[in-house]
Amino acid sequence: MMALRIRELALIVLAALLLLCGAAPVRAEVEATAAGIVLDEPGSAYLGRASSMMVELGGTLEAERALALQRAGRFSPVGEDVPKFGIGSPAVWLHLRVDSRYTEAQARRVLVGTSWIDRIDLFVVRDGQVVGRMQAGDGGPGLRAAKGNLGFVFEHVFEPGVTELLVRAETPDPLVLPLRVFDDECYQFAMRVHDFTYGLLYGFLLALIAYNAMLYAGLRDRAHRDYVLYLGCFVLLSMGYAGHGYNWLWPGMYGVQRYIILVLMVVLGYLGLRFASSSLGLAVAAPRAHRLAHGFGVAGMVAIGTCVVLDQQAAAAIVAFVFVLLFSVAMVWLGFSRLDGDRIAAGYFLAGALAAMAGAATTSLAVWNGLPYSNWTFHAAEVGIAIDGAILSLALAYRVRRIRRERLQAEQLSSLDPLTGLRNRRAFAVLGESAWSTAVRRQRPLSAVVLDLDHFKLINDVRGHAAGDAALKAVAGVIERNCRAADVAARWGGEEFVVLLPETTAVQAGVLAERLLHDIRGLDLTLDGGALSLSASIGVAERTTQPDLEALVREADQAMYAAKQGGRDRVVLALPA
């Protein structure tokens, strides 16, 4: 039932995530048409549909030549909010006409592209002449870096009238060209939202990393270690494709920037498969799935490593994106493969894997091909991993509870007599010492009762060991029913039982012993060989001058033997020393 609820939760999470990622409301704050935009309001909309484009073929074009081709009608309408050109695309030109109807010059920020584009050139055209050029990208020195996932930001003052913007972009990675024009207020708001959301995401993920690192330090469970590595890799990957890594962690390292995002995509998948294997116990429960997952992860690592060594960036991009899509499916498959085992753990994992799969696949397809690019689809991987982290933190908490429960059960089993369910002699010694210390420290009464079944060997010899076992279990039941919560009852060995009674004098213990004897006599045991009557010899001793618990039990044991010698089926109280 629990696994069914978790599976339903997984489907709800998947549906909600896909709905969020597909719904990308954009506030059109500029008047945008296929002929360009009118600069009379602050802007935040993507301006692809207001632009025209041309793929550069046959060599690098100068801006003047590209402008001439635009005038000659060689540019075609973009037809979507954010144009995408896939992996390994030739350089692309965009043209945007901006009509400023203000009477004074207006400062704006032009936001272009994504943080992983190698080079972007922005040309400003007035009256048919190129009057300005700005450069950005992560492909070499002297280029301005991206402002997080807002892309590359160019500042420009638009004079009244028509200004044309020509953008040239090139990269072997997926070429995505979001284009927006912001005033200062809109830009500052976008930066605040950007900083807040990434701060929230990284704070949440780092908290999960710290939580699981502490669990691993305490439990030495490999699943927690693998989850720390998996989340840590995602944080690095997110910082990479959001532009934070190039700004903060590896600034100016152009060779690293070319491949770091692609390599981290594959490493993330490899570590995710390791986490799946350890958290689901695949090595023992599903060795074939474990081998397949391990082989797939290693194959991805070898493929991306080969592309890096051979300096094939476009091939590396294809390997990374294909691997991420297959990895997303593999994680869900692994979750389904374990539903016939530990259904609760597998259900948690499956719900998280579905969220992560939907997010990773949505972002990959939005950046590469197959889904429209928007704020929601671009950030779907981060939303998915956050949902995945929340669900898997519940799964890991369930693992901790299960381990604790199993450990407690193991401790209980090690302290119980398997036949009667009473405590064994070792557990009696531990609990009895505590009761003894309390009685000595507070000078309170403490009594011991030792009970031995009469003629038990004869029962075993004549009626068989099954009858003997039934007799022992029946007597244990009598003892349990008559004891208080604070009393310590145990099977001492063979047919002998012992009960330690805190806050009980010898007289009071004698009353309990008589009640035990009465109930044992009244047991109605009917076995294959007929009815079985039982009796017991019971000895009682109270703490007085005995040096320790062992001496007290020994005194009660001697009283029990006195009962045997006195004819059995009776209670004898030890005389105080």
Image: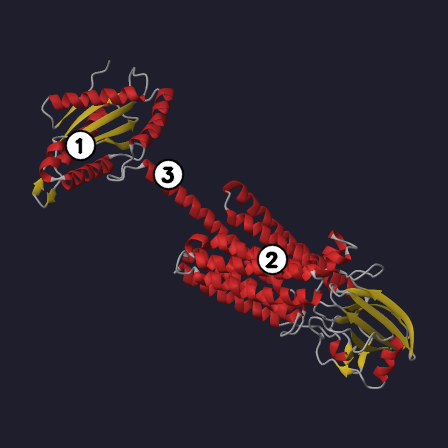
Q: Choose the circle earlier in sequence order: 3 or 1.
A: 3
Nearer the observer, 104 or 536: 536
- Could you tell me which quadrant the N terminus lies in? bottom left
In the image, is 498 to the left or to the right of 146? left
Q: Residue at x 75, y 68 (%)?
A: 171
What's the residue type where badge 3 is placed? Glu
Q: Is residue 242 visible?
A: no
Instruction: Please determine whether, in this image, residue 136 is positioned above or below residue 204.
Output: below
User: Is 355 above or below relative to 549?
Assistant: below
Q: Nearer the viewer, mark 2 or mark 3?
A: 2
Q: Quadrant of residue 543?
A: top left
- Residue appearing at x 32%, y 16% in the figure: 547
Q: Which residue is mark 1?
A: 515
Q: Which residue is mark 2?
A: 268
> Looking at the image, which is closer to me, 13 or 465?
465
Q: Position of residue 35 (x, y in %)?
A: 80, 83
Give the Cα separation between the discs numbered 1 and 2.
69 Å
Residues at marks 3 and 1 touching, judged by CB atoms closer than 8 Å: no
Residue 557 percent location from the top left of the image: 21, 23
